[in-house]
Image (cartoon, helix red, strand yellow):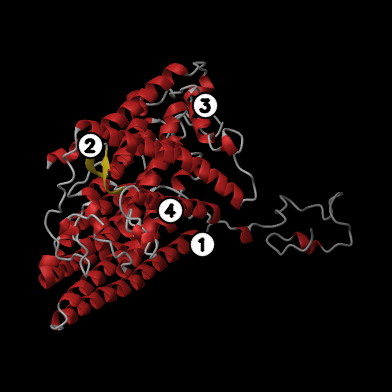
Amino acid sequence: MLSNYVPILVLLVIAAAFAIGSVIMGSLVGPKRYNRAKLDAYECGIEPSPEPAGPHRFPVKFYLTAMLFIVFDIEIIFLYPWAVAFGSLGIFGLVEMVLFIATVFVAYAYVWRRGGLEWD
Amino acid sequence: MSYPSSFGAPAVPPLAAAGDPDLSVFGGDPLWLILLKAVAVFAFLLLMTLFAIVFERKVVARMQQRVGPNRHGPKGWLQSLADGVKLMLKEDIIPVLADRPVFILAPVVSAIPAFLAFSVIPFGPEVSIFGHHTALQLADLPVAVLFVLSASSLGVYGLILSGWASGSTYPLLGSLRSAAQIISYEVAMGLSFVAVFLNSGTLSTSGIVAGQRHWWNVVLVPSFIIYCIAMVGETNRTPFDLPEAEGELVGGFHTEYSSIKFAFFFLAEYINTVTVSAVATTLFLGGWQPPPIPYFSHFDTGWFPVIWFVLKLLAFLFLFIWLRGTLPRLRYDQFMAFGWKVLIPVGLVWLLAVATFKVYRENVTDRTPWLIGFGIAVGILLIITLVDPGARKHAERLEAAERERTRNAPSLDRIPWPPPQPSSKSPSPPYGPGPNRPSSVIVAGGPRQES
Protein backbone atom coordinates (compact mmCIF):
# COMPACT_ATOMS: atom_id res chain seq x y z
CA MET A 1 0.00 0.00 0.00
CA LEU A 2 2.92 2.33 0.66
CA SER A 3 3.86 2.19 -3.01
CA ASN A 4 0.82 4.41 -3.62
CA TYR A 5 2.73 7.23 -1.99
CA VAL A 6 5.79 7.00 -4.26
CA PRO A 7 4.30 9.19 -7.05
CA ILE A 8 3.43 11.85 -4.46
CA LEU A 9 7.04 11.81 -3.29
CA VAL A 10 8.23 12.19 -6.88
CA LEU A 11 5.95 15.19 -7.36
CA LEU A 12 7.21 16.60 -4.05
CA VAL A 13 10.79 16.38 -5.28
CA ILE A 14 9.93 18.04 -8.60
CA ALA A 15 7.99 20.85 -6.92
CA ALA A 16 10.68 21.41 -4.29
CA ALA A 17 13.43 21.49 -6.91
CA PHE A 18 11.44 23.97 -8.98
CA ALA A 19 10.64 26.25 -6.02
CA ILE A 20 14.08 26.24 -4.41
CA GLY A 21 15.86 26.49 -7.75
CA SER A 22 13.75 29.45 -8.81
CA VAL A 23 14.29 31.30 -5.54
CA ILE A 24 18.05 30.79 -5.74
CA MET A 25 18.11 31.83 -9.38
CA GLY A 26 15.98 34.88 -8.66
CA SER A 27 18.44 36.05 -6.05
CA LEU A 28 21.35 35.55 -8.47
CA VAL A 29 19.86 37.05 -11.62
CA GLY A 30 18.28 40.21 -10.26
CA PRO A 31 20.14 43.51 -9.82
CA LYS A 32 21.40 44.53 -6.38
CA ARG A 33 21.05 48.25 -5.82
CA TYR A 34 20.09 48.52 -2.19
CA ASN A 35 19.32 51.70 -0.35
CA ARG A 36 17.81 52.48 3.01
CA ALA A 37 14.29 53.17 1.75
CA LYS A 38 14.11 49.80 0.04
CA LEU A 39 15.25 47.87 3.07
CA ASP A 40 12.82 49.56 5.48
CA ALA A 41 9.51 48.04 6.36
CA TYR A 42 6.84 49.29 3.96
CA GLU A 43 4.19 51.48 5.50
CA CYS A 44 2.69 53.33 2.56
CA GLY A 45 5.73 55.56 2.15
CA ILE A 46 5.75 57.15 5.61
CA GLU A 47 8.53 56.55 8.14
CA PRO A 48 7.93 53.02 9.45
CA SER A 49 6.87 52.77 13.07
CA PRO A 50 9.92 52.20 15.28
CA GLU A 51 8.36 49.10 16.83
CA PRO A 52 6.17 47.26 14.34
CA ALA A 53 3.37 45.02 15.58
CA GLY A 54 5.96 42.37 16.20
CA PRO A 55 5.66 38.61 16.45
CA HIS A 56 4.72 38.76 20.10
CA ARG A 57 1.74 41.05 19.91
CA PHE A 58 -1.45 40.41 18.02
CA PRO A 59 -5.13 40.36 18.94
CA VAL A 60 -6.14 37.52 21.25
CA LYS A 61 -9.14 36.97 19.00
CA PHE A 62 -6.96 34.97 16.61
CA TYR A 63 -6.02 32.49 19.35
CA LEU A 64 -9.69 31.97 20.08
CA THR A 65 -10.42 31.31 16.42
CA ALA A 66 -7.58 28.82 16.27
CA MET A 67 -8.87 26.92 19.32
CA LEU A 68 -12.41 26.81 17.95
CA PHE A 69 -10.99 25.53 14.69
CA ILE A 70 -9.19 22.69 16.44
CA VAL A 71 -12.36 21.62 18.24
CA PHE A 72 -14.45 21.61 15.10
CA ASP A 73 -11.82 20.13 12.85
CA ILE A 74 -11.39 17.17 15.18
CA GLU A 75 -15.13 16.71 15.18
CA ILE A 76 -15.13 16.62 11.40
CA ILE A 77 -12.24 14.19 11.25
CA PHE A 78 -14.32 11.90 13.48
CA LEU A 79 -17.13 12.20 10.98
CA TYR A 80 -15.05 10.91 8.04
CA PRO A 81 -14.56 7.26 9.07
CA TRP A 82 -18.12 7.22 10.28
CA ALA A 83 -19.35 8.43 6.89
CA VAL A 84 -17.27 5.84 5.04
CA ALA A 85 -18.54 2.98 7.19
CA PHE A 86 -22.07 4.30 7.40
CA GLY A 87 -23.47 1.72 5.01
CA SER A 88 -22.64 -1.12 7.36
CA LEU A 89 -23.41 0.72 10.61
CA GLY A 90 -27.02 1.50 9.79
CA ILE A 91 -29.33 2.88 12.45
CA PHE A 92 -26.83 2.28 15.24
CA GLY A 93 -24.34 4.53 13.47
CA LEU A 94 -26.94 7.24 12.95
CA VAL A 95 -27.98 7.34 16.60
CA GLU A 96 -24.37 7.32 17.76
CA MET A 97 -23.45 10.19 15.50
CA VAL A 98 -26.54 12.21 16.41
CA LEU A 99 -25.54 11.91 20.08
CA PHE A 100 -21.98 12.97 19.26
CA ILE A 101 -23.03 15.93 17.13
CA ALA A 102 -25.58 16.98 19.75
CA THR A 103 -22.80 17.06 22.35
CA VAL A 104 -20.62 19.22 20.16
CA PHE A 105 -23.61 21.37 19.35
CA VAL A 106 -24.15 22.14 23.03
CA ALA A 107 -20.57 23.40 23.21
CA TYR A 108 -21.12 25.36 20.02
CA ALA A 109 -24.30 26.94 21.43
CA TYR A 110 -22.43 27.84 24.61
CA VAL A 111 -19.60 29.51 22.67
CA TRP A 112 -22.07 31.38 20.53
CA ARG A 113 -24.12 32.55 23.51
CA ARG A 114 -21.06 33.73 25.40
CA GLY A 115 -20.07 35.86 22.42
CA GLY A 116 -17.12 33.72 21.34
CA LEU A 117 -18.16 33.95 17.72
CA GLU A 118 -18.48 37.75 17.72
CA TRP A 119 -15.72 39.61 16.01
CA ASP A 120 -15.40 43.07 17.48
CA MET B 1 -17.19 1.20 -20.26
CA SER B 2 -14.26 -0.42 -18.54
CA TYR B 3 -14.67 -0.02 -14.82
CA PRO B 4 -13.11 -2.15 -12.13
CA SER B 5 -15.57 -4.83 -11.13
CA SER B 6 -16.15 -3.47 -7.64
CA PHE B 7 -17.36 -0.19 -9.16
CA GLY B 8 -19.88 -1.82 -11.46
CA ALA B 9 -22.98 0.30 -12.00
CA PRO B 10 -25.26 -0.38 -9.03
CA ALA B 11 -28.92 0.53 -9.04
CA VAL B 12 -28.36 2.76 -6.01
CA PRO B 13 -25.12 4.53 -5.08
CA PRO B 14 -22.83 1.97 -3.42
CA LEU B 15 -23.77 2.65 0.16
CA ALA B 16 -22.52 -0.63 1.55
CA ALA B 17 -19.14 -0.45 -0.20
CA ALA B 18 -17.34 0.20 3.07
CA GLY B 19 -13.83 -1.02 3.66
CA ASP B 20 -10.77 -0.58 1.56
CA PRO B 21 -11.53 0.57 -1.96
CA ASP B 22 -10.04 -1.30 -4.88
CA LEU B 23 -6.83 0.61 -5.60
CA SER B 24 -4.98 -2.28 -7.22
CA VAL B 25 -4.56 -0.29 -10.43
CA PHE B 26 -2.42 2.24 -8.52
CA GLY B 27 1.00 1.66 -7.09
CA GLY B 28 2.15 -0.75 -9.78
CA ASP B 29 3.47 1.75 -12.31
CA PRO B 30 7.09 1.51 -13.44
CA LEU B 31 9.33 4.40 -12.48
CA TRP B 32 9.41 5.99 -15.93
CA LEU B 33 5.63 6.13 -15.96
CA ILE B 34 5.51 7.67 -12.49
CA LEU B 35 8.03 10.30 -13.61
CA LEU B 36 6.04 10.96 -16.77
CA LYS B 37 2.80 11.40 -14.84
CA ALA B 38 4.41 13.57 -12.15
CA VAL B 39 5.95 15.87 -14.76
CA ALA B 40 2.61 15.97 -16.57
CA VAL B 41 0.75 17.02 -13.41
CA PHE B 42 3.43 19.60 -12.64
CA ALA B 43 3.28 21.02 -16.17
CA PHE B 44 -0.51 20.99 -16.12
CA LEU B 45 -0.56 23.08 -12.95
CA LEU B 46 1.99 25.57 -14.29
CA LEU B 47 0.11 25.91 -17.57
CA MET B 48 -3.22 26.28 -15.81
CA THR B 49 -1.73 29.05 -13.66
CA LEU B 50 -0.32 30.90 -16.67
CA PHE B 51 -3.64 30.45 -18.45
CA ALA B 52 -5.81 31.35 -15.46
CA ILE B 53 -4.04 34.67 -14.85
CA VAL B 54 -4.48 35.87 -18.43
CA PHE B 55 -7.98 34.41 -18.59
CA GLU B 56 -8.94 36.26 -15.42
CA ARG B 57 -7.51 39.55 -16.65
CA LYS B 58 -9.20 39.22 -20.01
CA VAL B 59 -12.59 38.22 -18.62
CA VAL B 60 -12.57 40.91 -15.93
CA ALA B 61 -11.54 43.41 -18.58
CA ARG B 62 -14.52 42.44 -20.74
CA MET B 63 -16.83 42.69 -17.73
CA GLN B 64 -15.51 46.22 -17.17
CA GLN B 65 -15.74 47.28 -20.82
CA ARG B 66 -11.99 47.19 -21.29
CA VAL B 67 -9.79 45.22 -23.66
CA GLY B 68 -7.35 43.62 -21.25
CA PRO B 69 -3.84 42.38 -22.00
CA ASN B 70 -3.29 42.03 -25.74
CA ARG B 71 0.41 42.66 -26.41
CA HIS B 72 2.50 39.64 -25.48
CA GLY B 73 2.05 36.65 -27.72
CA PRO B 74 -1.01 35.89 -29.83
CA LYS B 75 -3.84 38.08 -28.53
CA GLY B 76 -1.96 38.61 -25.29
CA TRP B 77 -2.08 34.99 -24.11
CA LEU B 78 1.60 34.99 -23.13
CA GLN B 79 1.17 37.94 -20.78
CA SER B 80 1.63 35.97 -17.57
CA LEU B 81 4.72 34.23 -18.94
CA ALA B 82 6.21 37.65 -19.65
CA ASP B 83 5.25 38.75 -16.15
CA GLY B 84 6.99 35.71 -14.69
CA VAL B 85 10.20 36.38 -16.58
CA LYS B 86 10.06 40.03 -15.57
CA LEU B 87 9.60 39.15 -11.90
CA MET B 88 12.53 36.75 -12.09
CA LEU B 89 14.78 39.59 -13.31
CA LYS B 90 13.70 42.04 -10.61
CA GLU B 91 15.68 42.99 -7.55
CA ASP B 92 15.27 40.60 -4.63
CA ILE B 93 14.75 42.73 -1.53
CA ILE B 94 14.94 41.36 2.01
CA PRO B 95 14.05 44.04 4.58
CA VAL B 96 16.49 44.61 7.43
CA LEU B 97 13.93 43.74 10.07
CA ALA B 98 13.07 40.43 8.41
CA ASP B 99 13.98 37.04 9.82
CA ARG B 100 16.11 36.05 6.84
CA PRO B 101 15.93 32.21 6.70
CA VAL B 102 12.19 32.08 7.39
CA PHE B 103 11.57 34.97 5.03
CA ILE B 104 13.29 33.10 2.20
CA LEU B 105 11.69 29.76 3.05
CA ALA B 106 8.09 31.01 3.33
CA PRO B 107 7.27 31.22 -0.42
CA VAL B 108 8.74 27.74 -0.94
CA VAL B 109 6.66 26.36 1.94
CA SER B 110 3.64 28.01 0.42
CA ALA B 111 4.15 26.66 -3.11
CA ILE B 112 5.12 23.01 -2.55
CA PRO B 113 1.92 21.82 -0.79
CA ALA B 114 -0.10 23.59 -3.47
CA PHE B 115 1.45 21.28 -6.06
CA LEU B 116 1.05 18.20 -3.86
CA ALA B 117 -2.66 18.63 -3.27
CA PHE B 118 -3.33 18.01 -6.93
CA SER B 119 -1.61 14.62 -7.04
CA VAL B 120 -4.70 12.57 -6.14
CA ILE B 121 -7.09 14.25 -8.57
CA PRO B 122 -8.26 11.85 -11.31
CA PHE B 123 -7.97 13.20 -14.85
CA GLY B 124 -9.62 10.23 -16.51
CA PRO B 125 -10.18 6.48 -16.51
CA GLU B 126 -7.62 3.80 -17.26
CA VAL B 127 -5.78 4.21 -20.54
CA SER B 128 -2.84 2.61 -22.20
CA ILE B 129 0.39 4.67 -22.33
CA PHE B 130 3.11 3.11 -24.53
CA GLY B 131 1.53 -0.30 -24.06
CA HIS B 132 1.25 0.10 -20.31
CA HIS B 133 -2.21 -0.05 -18.76
CA THR B 134 -2.58 2.68 -16.16
CA ALA B 135 -5.04 5.15 -14.67
CA LEU B 136 -4.94 8.82 -15.67
CA GLN B 137 -4.20 9.83 -12.11
CA LEU B 138 -0.85 10.33 -10.43
CA ALA B 139 -1.76 8.49 -7.22
CA ASP B 140 -4.76 7.38 -5.26
CA LEU B 141 -4.96 6.63 -1.56
CA PRO B 142 -7.62 5.16 0.69
CA VAL B 143 -7.54 8.60 2.38
CA ALA B 144 -7.14 10.70 -0.77
CA VAL B 145 -9.55 13.50 0.15
CA LEU B 146 -7.96 13.74 3.58
CA PHE B 147 -4.64 14.13 1.81
CA VAL B 148 -5.97 17.02 -0.26
CA LEU B 149 -7.25 18.74 2.88
CA SER B 150 -3.99 18.27 4.74
CA ALA B 151 -1.84 19.43 1.83
CA SER B 152 -3.91 22.56 1.36
CA SER B 153 -3.74 23.22 5.11
CA LEU B 154 0.04 23.03 5.00
CA GLY B 155 -0.01 26.04 2.70
CA VAL B 156 -1.23 28.12 5.66
CA TYR B 157 2.21 27.71 7.21
CA GLY B 158 3.69 29.59 4.27
CA LEU B 159 1.32 32.51 4.82
CA ILE B 160 1.84 32.67 8.59
CA LEU B 161 5.61 32.40 8.29
CA SER B 162 5.79 35.06 5.60
CA GLY B 163 3.84 37.54 7.70
CA TRP B 164 5.74 36.70 10.85
CA ALA B 165 9.17 36.86 9.22
CA SER B 166 8.60 40.16 7.41
CA GLY B 167 9.08 42.21 10.59
CA SER B 168 6.46 44.64 9.41
CA THR B 169 2.97 45.50 10.58
CA TYR B 170 0.83 45.08 7.50
CA PRO B 171 2.12 41.65 6.48
CA LEU B 172 1.66 40.35 10.02
CA LEU B 173 -1.96 41.51 10.15
CA GLY B 174 -2.58 40.21 6.64
CA SER B 175 -1.15 36.80 7.40
CA LEU B 176 -3.16 36.48 10.62
CA ARG B 177 -6.29 37.38 8.75
CA SER B 178 -5.44 34.87 6.04
CA ALA B 179 -4.86 32.07 8.50
CA ALA B 180 -7.99 32.82 10.53
CA GLN B 181 -10.02 32.97 7.34
CA ILE B 182 -8.65 29.75 5.88
CA ILE B 183 -9.07 27.69 9.03
CA SER B 184 -12.56 29.07 9.62
CA TYR B 185 -13.76 28.12 6.18
CA GLU B 186 -11.95 24.81 6.24
CA VAL B 187 -14.43 23.63 8.88
CA ALA B 188 -17.35 24.34 6.57
CA MET B 189 -15.46 22.78 3.67
CA GLY B 190 -14.74 19.59 5.61
CA LEU B 191 -18.37 19.36 6.66
CA SER B 192 -19.61 19.62 3.10
CA PHE B 193 -17.43 16.61 2.15
CA VAL B 194 -19.07 14.30 4.66
CA ALA B 195 -22.28 14.05 2.64
CA VAL B 196 -20.19 12.95 -0.36
CA PHE B 197 -18.55 10.20 1.68
CA LEU B 198 -21.93 9.09 2.98
CA ASN B 199 -22.98 8.74 -0.62
CA SER B 200 -19.91 7.01 -2.01
CA GLY B 201 -18.70 5.05 1.00
CA THR B 202 -15.04 5.79 0.27
CA LEU B 203 -12.44 8.53 0.62
CA SER B 204 -10.52 7.58 -2.51
CA THR B 205 -11.05 10.04 -5.35
CA SER B 206 -11.29 7.42 -8.07
CA GLY B 207 -13.89 5.58 -5.99
CA ILE B 208 -15.90 8.77 -5.50
CA VAL B 209 -15.88 9.47 -9.24
CA ALA B 210 -16.91 5.89 -9.99
CA GLY B 211 -19.70 6.18 -7.43
CA GLN B 212 -21.09 9.13 -9.35
CA ARG B 213 -21.90 7.28 -12.55
CA HIS B 214 -25.46 8.45 -12.03
CA TRP B 215 -24.41 11.88 -11.06
CA TRP B 216 -27.15 14.12 -10.21
CA ASN B 217 -27.38 13.27 -6.61
CA VAL B 218 -29.90 15.82 -5.44
CA VAL B 219 -28.99 15.24 -1.78
CA LEU B 220 -25.54 16.61 -2.52
CA VAL B 221 -26.69 19.97 -3.87
CA PRO B 222 -26.80 21.86 -0.52
CA SER B 223 -23.38 20.44 0.35
CA PHE B 224 -22.18 21.57 -3.05
CA ILE B 225 -23.39 25.11 -2.40
CA ILE B 226 -21.68 25.15 1.01
CA TYR B 227 -18.50 23.88 -0.62
CA CYS B 228 -18.65 26.52 -3.36
CA ILE B 229 -18.87 29.29 -0.78
CA ALA B 230 -16.17 27.75 1.39
CA MET B 231 -13.78 27.27 -1.50
CA VAL B 232 -13.90 30.98 -2.32
CA GLY B 233 -13.14 31.77 1.31
CA GLU B 234 -10.44 29.13 1.34
CA THR B 235 -8.57 30.61 -1.62
CA ASN B 236 -8.77 34.23 -0.40
CA ARG B 237 -10.56 35.43 -3.47
CA THR B 238 -13.17 38.13 -3.97
CA PRO B 239 -15.63 38.65 -2.28
CA PHE B 240 -13.61 37.08 0.55
CA ASP B 241 -10.21 38.58 -0.32
CA LEU B 242 -9.89 40.36 3.04
CA PRO B 243 -6.26 39.35 3.61
CA GLU B 244 -5.29 41.28 0.53
CA ALA B 245 -7.72 44.12 1.03
CA GLU B 246 -5.78 46.79 -0.81
CA GLY B 247 -7.56 49.66 0.91
CA GLU B 248 -6.78 48.43 4.42
CA LEU B 249 -3.70 46.26 4.41
CA VAL B 250 -1.61 47.41 1.43
CA GLY B 251 -1.13 43.92 0.02
CA GLY B 252 -1.57 41.47 2.85
CA PHE B 253 1.02 38.91 3.87
CA HIS B 254 3.23 39.41 0.81
CA THR B 255 3.64 43.18 1.14
CA GLU B 256 7.39 42.92 1.80
CA TYR B 257 8.04 40.36 -0.91
CA SER B 258 9.44 41.17 -4.32
CA SER B 259 10.92 39.39 -7.30
CA ILE B 260 10.46 35.64 -7.73
CA LYS B 261 9.40 35.14 -4.10
CA PHE B 262 6.34 37.27 -4.73
CA ALA B 263 5.71 35.28 -7.88
CA PHE B 264 5.64 32.08 -5.83
CA PHE B 265 2.88 33.37 -3.57
CA PHE B 266 0.97 34.30 -6.67
CA LEU B 267 1.61 30.88 -8.16
CA ALA B 268 0.49 29.13 -4.97
CA GLU B 269 -2.70 31.16 -4.88
CA TYR B 270 -3.63 30.27 -8.43
CA ILE B 271 -2.70 26.62 -8.03
CA ASN B 272 -4.92 26.50 -4.95
CA THR B 273 -7.72 27.99 -7.01
CA VAL B 274 -7.25 25.29 -9.65
CA THR B 275 -7.07 22.60 -6.96
CA VAL B 276 -10.28 23.56 -5.18
CA SER B 277 -11.99 23.71 -8.58
CA ALA B 278 -10.70 20.23 -9.37
CA VAL B 279 -11.86 18.94 -5.99
CA ALA B 280 -15.31 20.40 -6.62
CA THR B 281 -15.37 18.72 -10.03
CA THR B 282 -14.27 15.39 -8.62
CA LEU B 283 -16.44 15.25 -5.55
CA PHE B 284 -19.63 16.90 -6.72
CA LEU B 285 -19.77 16.99 -10.50
CA GLY B 286 -18.70 13.48 -11.40
CA GLY B 287 -15.05 14.23 -12.16
CA TRP B 288 -14.10 13.12 -15.64
CA GLN B 289 -17.47 11.56 -16.41
CA PRO B 290 -19.27 13.08 -19.40
CA PRO B 291 -22.32 15.25 -18.80
CA PRO B 292 -25.57 13.26 -18.72
CA ILE B 293 -26.58 14.10 -22.26
CA PRO B 294 -27.41 11.01 -24.34
CA TYR B 295 -24.97 11.63 -27.17
CA PHE B 296 -22.01 12.69 -25.00
CA SER B 297 -22.24 9.75 -22.64
CA HIS B 298 -20.52 7.52 -25.21
CA PHE B 299 -17.28 9.46 -24.81
CA ASP B 300 -16.36 8.05 -21.44
CA THR B 301 -13.37 5.87 -22.28
CA GLY B 302 -9.78 6.46 -23.30
CA TRP B 303 -8.58 10.05 -23.42
CA PHE B 304 -11.94 11.75 -24.00
CA PRO B 305 -12.73 12.14 -20.27
CA VAL B 306 -9.77 14.51 -19.89
CA ILE B 307 -11.75 16.96 -22.04
CA TRP B 308 -14.76 16.76 -19.72
CA PHE B 309 -12.55 17.17 -16.70
CA VAL B 310 -10.80 20.27 -18.08
CA LEU B 311 -14.09 21.77 -19.23
CA LYS B 312 -15.63 21.40 -15.77
CA LEU B 313 -12.47 22.84 -14.24
CA LEU B 314 -12.63 25.85 -16.56
CA ALA B 315 -16.27 26.39 -15.66
CA PHE B 316 -15.26 26.72 -12.01
CA LEU B 317 -12.40 29.07 -12.89
CA PHE B 318 -14.87 31.21 -14.79
CA LEU B 319 -17.15 31.19 -11.74
CA PHE B 320 -14.29 32.54 -9.62
CA ILE B 321 -13.62 35.33 -12.12
CA TRP B 322 -17.31 36.11 -12.45
CA LEU B 323 -17.57 36.53 -8.69
CA ARG B 324 -14.58 38.84 -8.74
CA GLY B 325 -16.06 40.93 -11.51
CA THR B 326 -19.41 41.20 -9.75
CA LEU B 327 -19.24 41.31 -5.97
CA PRO B 328 -17.75 43.84 -3.53
CA ARG B 329 -15.64 42.76 -0.60
CA LEU B 330 -17.23 41.80 2.72
CA ARG B 331 -16.37 43.30 6.08
CA TYR B 332 -14.23 41.04 8.25
CA ASP B 333 -16.74 40.53 11.06
CA GLN B 334 -19.52 39.77 8.57
CA PHE B 335 -17.27 37.29 6.88
CA MET B 336 -16.31 35.43 10.05
CA ALA B 337 -19.88 35.46 11.31
CA PHE B 338 -21.07 33.98 8.04
CA GLY B 339 -18.60 31.13 8.26
CA TRP B 340 -19.14 30.26 11.91
CA LYS B 341 -22.81 31.05 12.38
CA VAL B 342 -24.33 30.09 9.03
CA LEU B 343 -22.20 27.62 7.11
CA ILE B 344 -21.25 25.34 10.02
CA PRO B 345 -24.73 24.83 11.53
CA VAL B 346 -26.29 24.46 8.10
CA GLY B 347 -23.62 21.94 7.15
CA LEU B 348 -24.11 19.91 10.33
CA VAL B 349 -27.88 19.85 10.05
CA TRP B 350 -27.78 18.92 6.40
CA LEU B 351 -25.30 16.16 7.09
CA LEU B 352 -27.64 14.64 9.68
CA ALA B 353 -30.51 14.99 7.25
CA VAL B 354 -28.59 13.08 4.55
CA ALA B 355 -27.64 10.33 7.00
CA THR B 356 -31.21 10.04 8.21
CA PHE B 357 -32.45 9.91 4.65
CA LYS B 358 -30.03 7.08 3.85
CA VAL B 359 -31.10 5.04 6.84
CA TYR B 360 -34.72 5.68 6.05
CA ARG B 361 -34.36 4.52 2.49
CA GLU B 362 -32.75 1.29 3.59
CA ASN B 363 -35.22 0.55 6.38
CA VAL B 364 -38.52 1.69 4.95
CA THR B 365 -40.46 -1.05 6.74
CA ASP B 366 -39.41 0.00 10.20
CA ARG B 367 -40.34 3.62 10.80
CA THR B 368 -39.57 4.02 14.51
CA PRO B 369 -35.85 4.89 14.19
CA TRP B 370 -36.72 7.31 11.44
CA LEU B 371 -39.06 9.10 13.78
CA ILE B 372 -36.44 9.10 16.54
CA GLY B 373 -33.83 10.58 14.19
CA PHE B 374 -36.32 13.16 12.99
CA GLY B 375 -37.15 14.11 16.56
CA ILE B 376 -33.48 14.57 17.39
CA ALA B 377 -32.93 16.68 14.28
CA VAL B 378 -35.87 18.88 15.26
CA GLY B 379 -34.40 19.16 18.75
CA ILE B 380 -31.14 20.39 17.31
CA LEU B 381 -32.98 22.93 15.19
CA LEU B 382 -34.77 24.10 18.33
CA ILE B 383 -31.42 24.55 20.06
CA ILE B 384 -30.30 26.78 17.20
CA THR B 385 -33.40 28.94 17.44
CA LEU B 386 -32.99 29.17 21.20
CA VAL B 387 -29.39 30.23 20.86
CA ASP B 388 -30.10 33.10 18.53
CA PRO B 389 -32.17 35.28 20.94
CA GLY B 390 -29.46 34.75 23.53
CA ALA B 391 -26.86 36.10 21.17
CA ARG B 392 -29.09 39.02 20.33
CA LYS B 393 -29.60 39.78 24.02
CA HIS B 394 -25.87 39.65 24.49
CA ALA B 395 -25.40 42.09 21.63
CA GLU B 396 -28.03 44.38 23.13
CA ARG B 397 -26.24 44.33 26.47
CA LEU B 398 -23.00 45.21 24.76
CA GLU B 399 -24.70 48.02 22.90
CA ALA B 400 -26.26 49.41 26.09
CA ALA B 401 -22.89 49.35 27.82
CA GLU B 402 -21.38 51.14 24.86
CA ARG B 403 -24.10 53.81 25.00
CA GLU B 404 -23.54 54.25 28.74
CA ARG B 405 -19.82 54.64 28.16
CA THR B 406 -20.20 57.26 25.48
CA ARG B 407 -23.03 59.20 27.10
CA ASN B 408 -20.84 61.92 28.52
CA ALA B 409 -18.31 61.89 25.74
CA PRO B 410 -18.30 64.90 23.44
CA SER B 411 -20.37 64.41 20.35
CA LEU B 412 -21.04 66.51 17.32
CA ASP B 413 -24.40 67.75 18.65
CA ARG B 414 -22.89 69.10 21.82
CA ILE B 415 -20.01 70.96 20.27
CA PRO B 416 -20.95 74.61 20.80
CA TRP B 417 -21.32 76.55 17.64
CA PRO B 418 -20.12 79.18 17.19
CA PRO B 419 -17.36 78.64 19.77
CA PRO B 420 -17.91 80.54 23.02
CA GLN B 421 -16.17 83.88 23.07
CA PRO B 422 -13.56 84.17 25.82
CA SER B 423 -14.92 87.52 27.00
CA SER B 424 -17.89 89.21 25.37
CA LYS B 425 -17.24 92.65 26.83
CA SER B 426 -17.49 94.37 23.50
CA PRO B 427 -21.05 93.78 22.24
CA SER B 428 -20.21 94.13 18.59
CA PRO B 429 -16.74 93.40 17.36
CA PRO B 430 -15.62 95.34 14.34
CA TYR B 431 -15.77 92.30 12.08
CA GLY B 432 -18.90 90.76 13.68
CA PRO B 433 -22.52 91.21 12.81
CA GLY B 434 -23.84 94.73 12.55
CA PRO B 435 -25.35 96.61 15.50
CA ASN B 436 -28.87 95.68 14.40
CA ARG B 437 -28.25 91.96 14.62
CA PRO B 438 -29.67 90.17 17.64
CA SER B 439 -26.83 89.10 19.86
CA SER B 440 -28.57 85.87 20.83
CA VAL B 441 -27.09 84.24 17.77
CA ILE B 442 -23.77 83.92 19.53
CA VAL B 443 -25.15 82.09 22.55
CA ALA B 444 -22.96 79.12 23.30
CA GLY B 445 -24.56 75.81 22.43
CA GLY B 446 -27.50 77.41 20.72
CA PRO B 447 -28.77 76.44 17.34
CA ARG B 448 -26.79 77.60 14.44
CA GLN B 449 -28.83 80.20 12.68
CA GLU B 450 -26.24 82.01 10.65
CA SER B 451 -23.77 80.73 8.29
Which of the two discs, 1 and 3, labels the residue nearer the N terminus? 3
Are callouts 4 and 2 both on one chain? Answer: no
User: What is the CA distance from the residue labelled 4 to the residue labelled 2?
Assistant: 27 Å
Q: Which mark is residue B316?
A: 4
> What is the crowding at mark 1: few (fewer than 14 residues within 10 Å), some, or many (at least 20)?
few
The reply to the same-chain question for discs 1 and 2 is: no
State the residue at coordinates (41%, 68%). Answer: B396
Q: Dot 2: what SS?
A: helix
Query: The numbered mark 2 sits on a residue in which chain?
Result: A
Q: Which amino acid is tagged 4? A: Phe
Q: Nearer the viewer, mark 1 or mark 2?
A: 2
Q: Amino acid at mark 1?
A: Arg
Protein chain holding label 3: B
Labels 1, 3: front one: 3
Q: Residue at label 3?
A: B86
Q: CA distance from mark 1 to mark 3?
A: 57 Å
User: Which mark lies nearer to you, 4 or 2?
Assistant: 2
Report the Cα–Cα distance between label 4 and label 1. 51 Å
Instruction: Determine the chain carrying the residue at label 1.
Output: B
Q: Secondary structure at mark 1?
A: loop
Q: Circle 2 is placed at which residue position?
A: A7
Quadrant showing the N terminus of chain A: top left
Q: Amino acid at mark 3?
A: Lys
> Toward the viewer: B26 or B145?
B26
Query: How dense is the environment of label 2, judged by Cα within 10 Å: few (below 14), some, or many (20 and up)?
Result: many
Residue at the spot 56% in from the left edge and 45% down from the top edge: B58
> Which residue is tagged 1?
B407
Give the residue at x 39% y 35%.
B163
Distance (Cα) linking label 3 and label 4? 29 Å
- The residue under label 2 is which amino acid type? Pro
Q: Quadrant of residue B187?
A: bottom left
